Amino acid sequence: QVQLVESGGDLVQPGGSLRLSCAASGSIVAIDVMRWYRQAPEKPRELVASITSGGRINYGDDVKGRFTISRDDRENTVDLQMDSLKPDDTAVYYCYAQIWINTSLRSDYWGKGTLVTVSS
């Protein structure tokens, strides 16, 4: 059974920083793309950042220059460093990964989310 568990969500003031982490555990052969999504109240889920196993990175337009995604393939983790936070960054942040659980089966997995609140 594969699980993704996020951590690091908190209440932070505008202009502050926060670091989110996501750890994958279970029967994992390899991990392809890892992503962070977020969903604010009454808004659709949106892509925040993406990193492939080859290191290719993409960011959503709203977070470019402020957020940094990274991964550690030895630990099966993906982090999201968030700087210059704004109230509009308030959302539940979800981790996503495409994981090979054997040499012929790759599935999509989601974490349960971690809440980030940016407010003074």
Image: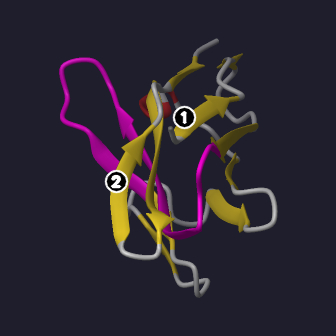
Tell me, yes or no, whether the two marked residues, 1 and 2, touch with CB atoms within 8 Å: no
Position of the C terminus, as image quadrant, is top right
Residue 95 covered by magenta stretch: no
Q: Residue furthest right?
A: 74
Crowdedness of circle 1 by 10 Å Cα count: few (<14), some, many (20+)?
some
Q: Which residue is mark 2?
A: 108
How crowded pointer 2 is (Cα within 10 Å; few <14, some 14-19, many 20+) is rated as few
Q: From the viewer's perspective, is residue 106 above or below residue 119? A: below
Range of magenta residues = 25-48
Q: Nearer the viewer, mark 1 or mark 2?
A: 2
What's the residue at 73%, 68% (across, down)? 73
Report the residue at 70% width, 35% height from top.
15
Image coordinates for residue 59, horizontal then vertical, percent: 46, 67
Secondary structure under tag 2 reads strand
Residue 35 % position (x, y):
47, 57
Point 39% across, 38% down: residue: 38
Residue 91 % position (x, y) = 43, 26
